[in-house]
């Protein structure tokens, strides 16, 4: 078939062959993209019922959008051939890797986690693969897994009435289309011919994982019948891992395999999500070099925090020595100790306040997080990630993280330990307690308590409790002493002020309520005017959202007293001030590096360092930091956005942007900017239908986004769906009456529709609005270019040329120019240096020249814009004013250089 055109696909070469069909590399002549075209054997599609079931499942799989599932574009027939058009994946099959021998434990767990995440998405949508095996998993050139061939098992799955025993399964293997070896990956229920569900995929996944780790399948025999018998009867073999695996790691991996390969589906993992959690945890422990040896106390020994608190009160009333009570309690709870790896994660649940005094609500949570957060040895699971976990659990309304909720979050995130603190008190005397718990069983491993004589000593008692917890987890005494500034110094001696700070932070995190947060920060400072942390937080909030001068003053005061903060807060504030207020990027760079030297696992710090590198045009360094942030926190949406901004607007790496967007959507499918950037990337590839779908999804999430309406309108225009484009541009005006650009775009589309009267009306409306703007600001170069363009569109080219010439004489700030000089010039000189005739002006000049028919001069102007730093090649490709240039070779060459697809 090489050289033939099937439907709108021109077949270029054969790239694979198997029982399920022949796979070709082909080019989609409509969308100008390469695809993989799987042509199905006639015997597989001759049975109408099988074909119907296959198409139904394959169409459902085509709706999946996940970075670890190959995208299906189309299922169709042409010239008597049935075919599937899908994403062309450059790489090799996992089967080819395993045939060369076992993979390393780290590589196996990495790929297994990605496969599990892809299957989890499919299972969530009610789709079961039914034929998971290394031959149906691709490993891309950038070493990521992608599952292929969803739905094809439906073509060879016989009706239930055919049989329900092993012989039925063997008949399946001899059916046309089934390649030898598939039987090795069958679940017991598949082998018996009984009904299967998603847990059958979990069994097959276990076989694949075993094969990655050992180079062979776990159940095998001399014949296919022997292999099936082994699947049904033999226990899971013990896996032999290489020297990289410590005994604890090997034990954990064996536990995962045993649970995947249980004969009874009810004894396996019940969801692929749960399996993915355990795989991520195993990867994290492998990277840290050890596994915490946790031996929780038997349930009969478990002592709840409430009971512990009551016992502490009784001890106070009876006059017992509280340290003696604490030691007795520790022995009662468990005689084991906990081995905690450096930089391992600890989830701290909310304080249980048993005093009845609401002053301790919220305030002690913040205080304990700050105190433990000083440690470079312990990673305290951030409140932002707890909130994100609650969002995924659809429990955003949870106000207090109690023991049960904390353990559930820890298990989902692959954390082993939970810290459960409480406070009790009677007669003005208080006991602060905390128990280290095993997240899975809830068993208490260790417990600590501190007694204080009055409320004024509670924060100092919390300091002491924090040190004991750190010591219990294995941190060296010298390190604890070095990183333990007293809470009263780094926060405030006022519990009420601390509570206001806590409430403000929660308002920002949970509700993005900037106004209420500002009032609460101000309340904290009214209570304690020397509260440096509150000054810094309020200063950053003012700088970003309210009054920059107020923010500048507050930040300056915080910087002057930066030593009155934890190291984590100090370097954050100093970096923010250097970057935002001083515009001193090298200085900010130094502060973020200093912070990460102490706390290397702070995802937000990696993100912020990436932002500095990005502003300095050090894109490789920025990419590395954003990727580090995403690796540490896969739900840090800002890092995805910033990284894709580099791919899309600086480097033109469209394929990388698409892959990253899909990764982001896999973690949060309701984040509007992921679809915005995905649509923009598809415009860069020329895949207009995918672009349209992405922008429509963004608008489904937030119908009031004018940016998405503009982009959707331009997509319709490029598809020549002019009526839809016109309606979309006019919708912008409905959403935001202050917008004026829709009239210009509506005029262009009306002209393309042949409606000259409507086009002139829209252009006149735009001209009226833009002339008002130029009268109010005669030196607005952007507005002058817009006026020049609309004058040209209205037939007054001479005046348009004159206005354009005037616009080119005006200095204009540009994003590129600002970044290029910010590394060189101090703030006092920067505004003058950046106000130059830069790339944006040359880009606008190119638009004007293009509309005026001066095509060669327009390309000259675009080349100058690029020389000066213009990098938005996708906008250059799709801009309505540059469509006159699409057949210019120099224009196409410019796009080819800029869009590294």
Image (tube, rainbow, N blue to C red):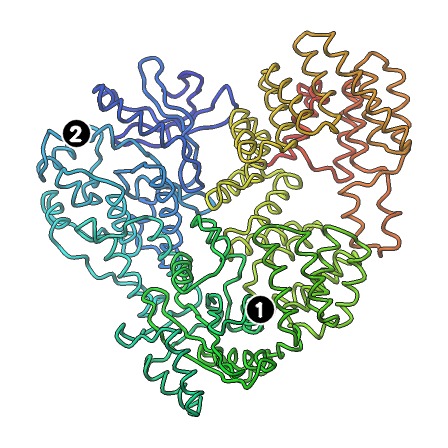
Residue sitting at x 60%, y 33%: 680
Corner quadrant of residue 445: bottom left
Q: Against 871, is 569 above or below? A: below
> Which mark sits nearer the N-terminus, 1 or 2?
2
Q: Secondary structure at mark 2?
A: loop
Q: Position of residue 202 (x, y in %)?
A: 27, 47
Q: Against 160, is 528 above or below? A: below
User: Which quadrant of the rendered structure holds the N terminus?
Assistant: top left
Between 323 and 861, the residue placed more toward the observer is 323
- 3D distance between C-alphas at marks 1 and 2: 63 Å
Q: Which residue is mark 2?
A: 158
Q: Which residue is mark 1?
A: 363
* Image-based side of 227 in relation to 642, left or right: left
Q: Position of residue 841 (x, y in %)?
A: 81, 33
Q: Secondary structure at mark 1?
A: helix
Q: Against 151, is 643 above or below? A: below
Say few, some or many: other residues with alpha carbon within 10 Å of mark 1 (under 14 / 14 to 19 / 20 or more): many
* Image-based side of 661 in relation to 406, left or right: right
């Amino acid at each position: 078939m090489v050289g033939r055109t099937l439907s709108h696909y021109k077949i270029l070469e054969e790239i694979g062959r198997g029982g399920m069909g022949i796979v070709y590399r082909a080019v989609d002549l409509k969308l100008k993209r390469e695809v993989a075209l799987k042509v199905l054997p006639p015997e597989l599609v001759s049975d109408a019922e099988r074909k119907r079931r296959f198409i139904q499942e394959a169409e459902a799989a085509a709706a999946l959008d996940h970075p670890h599932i190959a995208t299906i574009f189309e299922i169709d027939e042409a010239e008597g051939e049935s075919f599937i058009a899908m994403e062309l994946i450059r790489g090799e099959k996992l089967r080819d890797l395993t045939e060369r021998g076992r993979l390393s434990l780290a590589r196996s767990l990495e790929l297994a986690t990605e496969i599990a995440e892809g299957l989890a998405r499919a299972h969530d949508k009610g789709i079961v693969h039914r034929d998971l095996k290394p031959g149906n998993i691709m490993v891309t050139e950038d070493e990521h897994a992608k599952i292929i061939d969803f739905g094809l098992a439906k073509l060879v799955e016989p009706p239930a009435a055919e049989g329900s025993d092993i012989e039925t399964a063997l008949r399946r293997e001899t059916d046309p289309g089934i390649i030898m070896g598939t039987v090795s990956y069958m679940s017991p229920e598949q082998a018996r011919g009984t009904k299967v569900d998603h847990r059958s995929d979990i069994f097959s996944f276990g076989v694949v994982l075993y094969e990655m780790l050992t180079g062979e399948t776990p159940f095998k025999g001399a014949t296919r019948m022997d292999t099936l018998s082994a699947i049904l009867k033999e226990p899971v073999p013990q896996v032999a891992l290489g020297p990289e695996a410590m005994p604890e790691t090997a034990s954990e991996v064996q536990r995962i395999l045993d649970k995947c390969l249980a004969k009874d589906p009810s004894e396996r993992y019940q969801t692929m999500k749960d399996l993915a959690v355990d795989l991520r945890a195993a990867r994290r422990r492998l990277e840290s070099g050890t596994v915490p040896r946790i031996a929780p106390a038997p349930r009969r020994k478990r002592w709840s925090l409430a009971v512990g608190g009551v016992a502490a009160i009784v001890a106070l009333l009876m006059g017992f020595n509280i340290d003696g009570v604490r030691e007795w309690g520790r022995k009662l709870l468990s005689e084991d100790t906990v081995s905690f790896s450096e930089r391992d994660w600890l989830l701290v649940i909310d304080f249980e306040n048993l005093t009845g005094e609401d002053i301790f609500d919220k305030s002690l949570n913040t205080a304990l997080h700050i105190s433990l957060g000083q440690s470079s040895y312990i990673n305290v699971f951030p409140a932002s990630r707890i909130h994100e976990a609650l969002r995924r659990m659809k429990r955003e309304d949870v106000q207090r993280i109690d023991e049960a909720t904390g353990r559930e979050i820890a298990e989902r995130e692959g954390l082993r330990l939970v810290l459960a603190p409480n406070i009790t008190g009677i007669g003005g005397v208080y006991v602060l307690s905390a128990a280290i718990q095993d997240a899975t069983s809830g068993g208490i491993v260790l417990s600590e308590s501190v007694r204080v004589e009055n409320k004024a000593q509670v924060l100092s008692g919390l300091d002491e409790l924090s040190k004991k917890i750190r010591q219990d987890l294995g941190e060296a005494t010298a390190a604890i002493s070095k990183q333990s500034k007293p809470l009263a110094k780094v926060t405030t001696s006022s519990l009420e002020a601390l509570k206001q700070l806590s409430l403000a932070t929660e308002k920002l995190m949970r509700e993005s309520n900037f106004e209420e947060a500002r009032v609460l920060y101000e309340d904290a400072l009214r209570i304690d005017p020397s509260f440096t942390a509150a000054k810094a937080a309020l200063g950053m909030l003012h700088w970003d959202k309210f009054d920059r001068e107020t923010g500048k003053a507050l930040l300056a005061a915080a910087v002057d007293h930066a030593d009155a903060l934890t190291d984590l807060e100090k370097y954050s504030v100093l970096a923010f001030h250097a970057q935002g207020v001083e515009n001193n990027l090298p200085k900010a760079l130094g502060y973020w590096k200093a912070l990460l030297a102490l706390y290397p696992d702070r995802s937000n710090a990696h993100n912020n360092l990436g932002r500095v590198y990005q502003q300095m045009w050090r894109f490789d360094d920025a990419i590395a930091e954003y990727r580090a942030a995403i690796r540490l926190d896969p739900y840090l949406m800002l890092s995805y956005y910033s990284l894709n901004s580099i791919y899309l607007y600086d480097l033109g790496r469209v394929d990388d942007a698409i892959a990253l967007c899909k990764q982001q959507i896999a973690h949060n499918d309701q984040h509007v900017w992921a679809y915005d950037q995905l649509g923009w990337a598809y415009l860069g590839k020329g895949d207009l239908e995918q672009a349209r779908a992405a922008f429509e999804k963004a608008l489904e999430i937030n119908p009031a986004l004018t940016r998405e309406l503009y982009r959707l309108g331009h997509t319709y225009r490029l598809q020549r769906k002019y009526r839809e484009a016109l309606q979309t541009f006019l919708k912008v005006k409905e959403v935001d009456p202050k917008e004026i650009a829709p009239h210009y775009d509506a005029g262009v589309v009306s002209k393309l529709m042949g409606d000259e009267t409507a086009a002139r009306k829209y252009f006149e409306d735009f001209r009226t609005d833009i002339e008002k703007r130029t009268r109010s600001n005669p030196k607005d170069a952007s507005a002058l270019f817009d006026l020049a363009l609309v004058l040209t569109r209205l037939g007054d080219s001479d005046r348009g040329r004159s206005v354009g010439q005037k616009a080119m004489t005006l200095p204009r700030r540009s994003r590129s120019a600002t970044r290029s000089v910010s590394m060189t010039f101090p703030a006092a000189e920067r505004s003058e240096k950046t106000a130059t005739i830069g790339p944006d002006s040359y880009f606008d000049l190119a638009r004007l020249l293009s509309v005026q028919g001066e095509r060669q001069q327009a390309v000259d102007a675009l080349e100058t814009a690029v020389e000066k730093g213009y990098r938005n090649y996708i906008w250059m490709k799709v801009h309505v004013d540059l469509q006159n240039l699409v057949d210019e070779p120099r224009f196409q060459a410019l796009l080819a250089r800029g869009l590294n697809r």
